[in-house]
């Protein structure tokens, strides 16, 4: 241990000293989510008047964006995000811009396509007796960023849980250039959002199609929360977990004894994930838990890997869908909301799984400025981003039922989608389908 402690001490610097590594025009990468830089970014923001055109890459930067706040014009610091969420949203289109990607390709793009980073900064656990820092909640893309950077800086935070792998879940002190003993900010927590009545009905539609031994991938929000609660209260058993994001819904299922992983084809008995965000109870649960395995996202989200797991169930949400079966999950028109993330990865992987099911969920309507609108539309809102092309979409779910898009022609798709739209909008959707020539006289709604 002493040899690693000596090396640790030699590499220990202040955040202000580490921030001196950055020069004008550099690219800097902050690790994913809960492992995003905090003290380093705060120190870098103090150099506002010295630096120009510093580009910061991040993915769901979970902490305060000090550099973005210091420079609203983006002249000195510009953020570039692989996925927009939380703190990112108030900066999008100003001094933060989105990088389109399919999540499982992020490590490949980082190693192959990006302008290399001058510095990568990763929030980590304290060093263990063998000289390793653990990446905690976010193994996702870290090693790819390390390999694509000139300098590796770690910020030690003793509140980061130690998450077992998997692989690529840790880094050795010998592979690190500088160490910051950070201010130990609290980990951001996600409040559990109670599902709406419509979301509960959507979850029930999905639960009715689940069975013992399913391997589950969940997104975030009211519908996954509802699914987790219903599963916890159901008779289902021997469920598996293979997901990008580990959320509190899994904790509920695990506490109820529903998750064993006994029937998984690969990583049997392990709950596999790439990153975690949720309650403090969730962080406590994943800490040093040998029943979980943290992997990089080019493993968890790889459609080829997902397809090898039988009886896979993928559950995600979207913003709107059109009568052709095109799904938008990341923008309202041209107004950016989130990103592709891993949705398309799991849509494609789950469908290719033996007996696999991919569900994209949305309440049938939304209230905008006091006016109720259908979320199933003739065409997507102009400028909307297609997250899942019609060729990939499997099953779409509202509170009125499930529409399977696979193997259906355009008129069959229109019929199936209108059948799960809100009844108040079905007539006008039929009329629009007729005008678009994707409706036949013998069509019927069931």
Image: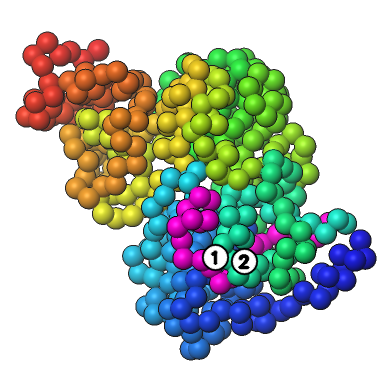
Tell me the distance, in whole angstroms, between the alpha carbons under discs 2 and 1: 6 Å
258 relative to 129, above or below:
above
**Magenta range:** 107-128
Residue 353: where, in percent of width, then height? Answer: 50, 22
User: Is 187 one of the magenta-colored residues?
Assistant: no
From the viewer's perspective, is 262 left or right of 233?
right
Residue 67: where, in percent of width, then height? Answer: 50, 75
Looking at the image, which residue is at 59% across and 75% down?
A: 42
Element class at badge 1: strand
Sequence-earlier tag: 2 or 1:
1
From the viewer's perspective, is 219 left or right of 437?
right
Residue 363: where, in percent of width, then height? Answer: 35, 33
Circle 1: is it few (<14), some (14-19), or many (20+) Cα within 10 Å?
many
Quadrant position of the C terminus in the picture: top left
User: Is 108 one of the magenta-colored residues?
Assistant: yes
Q: For residue 121, which numbered disc appears in the image?
A: 2
The answer to whether marks 2 and 1 mark residues whose Cβ atoms lie closer than 8 Å is yes
Residue 429: where, in percent of width, then height? Answer: 16, 28
Q: Give the residue number, with chain letter if any, for mark 1.
A: 29
View extreme (front): residue: 112
Instruction: Work out whether residue 371 can be spotted.
Output: yes
From the viewer's perspective, is 373 left or right of 361?
left
Q: For residue 234, which numbered disc appears in the image?
A: none
187 relative to 191, above or below:
below
Element class at badge 2: strand
Q: How many marks?
A: 2
Please identify the quarter of the rendering in which residue 230 is found.
Answer: top right
């Amino acid at each position: 241990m002493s040899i690693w402690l000596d090396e640790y001490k030699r590499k220990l610097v202040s955040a202000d000293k580490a921030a001196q590594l950055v020069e004008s025009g550099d690219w800097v990468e902050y690790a994913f989510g809960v492992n995003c830089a905090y003290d380093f970014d705060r120190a870098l923001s103090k150099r506002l008047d010295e630096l120009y055109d510093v580009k910061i890459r991040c993915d769901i930067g979970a902490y305060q964006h000090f550099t973005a706040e210091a420079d609203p014009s983006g002249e000195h610091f510009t953020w570039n995000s692989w996925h927009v969420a939380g703190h990112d949203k108030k900066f999008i289109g100003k001094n933060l811009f989105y990088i389109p990607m399919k999540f499982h390709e992020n490590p490949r793009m980082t190693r192959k396509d990006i302008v290399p980073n001058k510095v990568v900064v990763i929030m980590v656990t304290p060093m263990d007796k063998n000289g390793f820092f653990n990446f905690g909640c976010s193994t996702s893309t870290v090693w790819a960023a390390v390999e694509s950077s000139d300098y590796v800086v770690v910020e030690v935070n003793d509140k980061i849980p130690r998450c077992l792998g998997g692989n690529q879940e840790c880094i050795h002190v010998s592979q690190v250039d500088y160490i910051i003993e950070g201010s130990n900010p609290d980990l951001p927590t996600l409040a559990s959002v109670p599902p709406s009545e419509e979301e509960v009905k959507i979850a029930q539609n999905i639960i009715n199609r689940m069975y013992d031994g399913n391997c589950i991938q969940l997104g975030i929000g009211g519908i996954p929360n509802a699914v987790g609660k219903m599963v916890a209260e159901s008779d289902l058993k021997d469920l598996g977990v293979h997901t990008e994001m580990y959320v509190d819904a899994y904790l509920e299922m695990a506490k109820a004894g529903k998750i064993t992983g006994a029937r998984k084809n690969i990583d049997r008995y392990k709950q596999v994930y790439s990153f975690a965000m949720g309650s403090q109870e969730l962080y406590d649960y994943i800490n040093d838990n040998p029943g979980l395995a943290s992997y990089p996202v080019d493993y968890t989200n790889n459609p080829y890997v997902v397809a090898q797991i039988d009886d896979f169930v993928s559950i995600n949400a979207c913003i709107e869908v059109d009568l052709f079966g095109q799904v938008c999950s990341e923008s309202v028109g041209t107004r950016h909301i989130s990103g592709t993330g891993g949705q398309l990865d799991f849509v494609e992987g789950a469908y290719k799984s033996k007996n696999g099911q991919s569900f994209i969920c949305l309440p049938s309507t939304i209230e905008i400025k006091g006016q109720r609108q259908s979320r199933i539309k003739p065409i997507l809102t102009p400028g909307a981003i297609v997250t899942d092309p019609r060729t990939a979409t499997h099953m779409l779910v509202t509170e009125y039922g499930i529409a399977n898009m696979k193997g259906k022609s355009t008129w069959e798709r229109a019929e199936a989608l209108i059948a799960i739209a809100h009844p108040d909008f079905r007539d006008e959707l039929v009329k629009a389908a007729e005008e678009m020539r994707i409706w036949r006289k013998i069509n019927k709604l069931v």
